[in-house]
Every structure is written in C-alpha cells, then in structure tokens.
Image: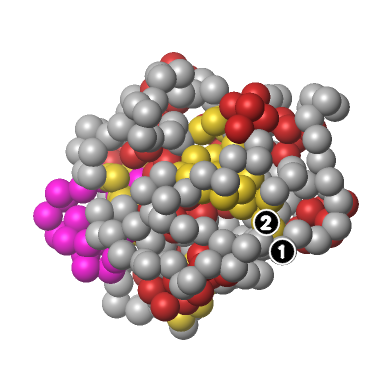
Amino acid sequence: MPEVEKPAPDTVPSLVSADWLAQRLGDPALRLIDIRSVVDGGARGAYLTAHIPGTVHSDYVEDGWRATRGMATGLLPEPDALAVLLGGIGLTPEQTAVVIAAGTSAGDFAAAARVFWTLRMAGHPRITILDGGMAAWTADPARPVVGGPSKPPQAAPYPVAIASGPRAEIPRVVRALATDDAVLLDTRALSFFEGRAQSPQARVPGRLPGAFLLDHTTLWDAASGRLKDRAALEALVASVPKAPVVTYCNTGHQAATPWLVLSEILGWPDVSLYDGSMSEWTEEPSRPVATGPDERKRG
C-alpha cells in the first residue's frame, strides 16, 4: 500500500487494506459503499452475486455521482442532488465512508478516486478507499461475502457543505493559462494529449496549452491490482513542478487518480481537479487548444 503512516485517532488513511476492513466489519461507524458499474463490467449484477456484508451498492455511472451539462458529462452534481444521493445510501457526517470498487483496472480505480473527490467536495470529513477493491477482499476465501440486495438504513438528506479547494472551474483554468500560476496536468494517454485521439465528449481533439502529461494508468500496478507504492508514485510525479496543480482529462474521471495521489497520498498542497475537463473546455470554440508534441520541449 502507498500509505504506511499510522493515522491519528480521528482520521483514516486514504487507502486501507482488506485486513483493515475485515477487522472492523460490522462497525456502524463505517459506511461501506460498493460503486461497481459498467466501468468494471460488473455493476449491480456483480453486487447481487457477491458483496462485502453491510455494503450498500451505489452505481458510479447510473446513480448520480456525475452530472451532465451541455457537452460536459462528468461535472460535480448540484448540492441538492448530492444531499439526496448521500442520504440515500445512509451516509451521515459522523461515519467513515469506505469506497469499494471492483479492483480490476486503472479506470476502475479512477472511479473510486472520483467518488472520494466527490465526497470531499460535499464536505464529508473521513473517506477511504479499499486498496485493491473487491478483488483484494475475495483473494482470501476466509473473508465473508453475501449475495442478494441490501437496503441501507435511510438517512436524512446529507448536510452538504461544498468545499472550494479540491475543484477547479473554468475561471481557474483561464487564470492558469494567462498567468502560469498553476501546473495544468493532463492525465490522459499520450495520443489524447497530442490530439491524435479524440474523446466523443470533446468538440475537438487536443490539450490545454502548456499542460504537463501524467498518464493516470502509470500510477496503477496491473499485476497487484493496486496503486503503486509510495516510492514509485514519488518517482512518477518527480517531473511535475511543485506548484499549485490542476488535474484534468476528458470528463473528470481519469484525473481523479492523480488528484488523489498528489493531494491525499503524497500531501501536496493546492491540488484541484477540473471536473469539466476537455468536454467542457472545448464546448466554446474560442478557448485555446494545443495539439502535436509537447510545445514546452520543442526547440
């Protein structure tokens, strides 16, 4: 696991092991949220077949974790919608939210990271991700699983208090382009960065001018089904300037993993996620977009 420090009594690390969770199974202070969806190919069917006891299912794609406005398909939901979503899964401010993905791919981990970010944006104080997801849990046949539906205890609408720091919106990106006061971190594959590939959600291919590249998949270890260890993560982000950072991708999904790594695991200050990303940015034709090899390395 990338994090090894012992947390303070009133905090929880950003990633916890299956053993950590097994020791606390049934604790009402935890709200276990299984987010399996079409991203991992399992969705609710996989949950109904087998899930961790006490877990509530909330589909990352279908249940409102991301909102659409215009071309932008991955925006932070409005506060009222978040209040209903979080209350509907029985989450209360006093609980630790444990986000559980399938543990199958870098994209699947990004879903967990994006849910983590959304909970942070909603003002929830204690959030963690099950390191390795369901794959890590079921690796030990002694750990229990159950099937069938599970109805969470209904809570009142969650008292959402939107945070400002973790989110970048269009004015922040415009300022970064104009003043170079933040690193714009493109977290997609090189083909998208250079404009050789295009997301169907974007009007045109390309990147934010002057952006640095950090492919989110490089942070994930396919062999273990987990994020890479802390030393490897430090090495992978070594080329990113130590400055305010804005992560982005096509729809604010992939960008959640580098946001989590930089902000929550490595402890960098002033790291935000542009949830509108290129789907929103390219909606307006006058906004600048760069293509081709990295312009900072030319000449």
Element under disc 2: strand
Residue occupying the point 35% across, 27% down: 8
Residue tagged 1? 151
| Left or right: 137 in relation to 207 | right
The answer to the question of whether label 2 and label 1 lie on touching residues, with beta carbons closer than 8 A, is yes
Which amino acid, mark 2? Val
Q: Earlier in the sequence, mark 2 or mark 1?
A: 2
Tell me how many marks there are. Answer: 2
Question: Dot 2 surroundings within 10 Å: few (below 14), some, or many (20 or more)?
Answer: many
* Scheme of image coloration: secondary structure
| Residue 198 visible in this rendered orientation of the protein | no
Residue 272: percent from the left, percent from the top? 31, 51
Residue 30: percent from the left, percent from the top? 55, 44
Bounds of the magenta segment: 167-190
User: Where, by quadrant of the figure, is residue 198 drawn?
Assistant: bottom right
Viewer-closest of 4 and 95? 95
Q: In this view, does 41 lie above or below 24?
A: below
Residue occupying the point 78% across, 47% down: 51
Element under disc 1: loop
187 is within the stretch colored magenta: yes
Q: Which mark is residue 56?
A: 2
Q: Quadrant of the N terminus?
A: top right
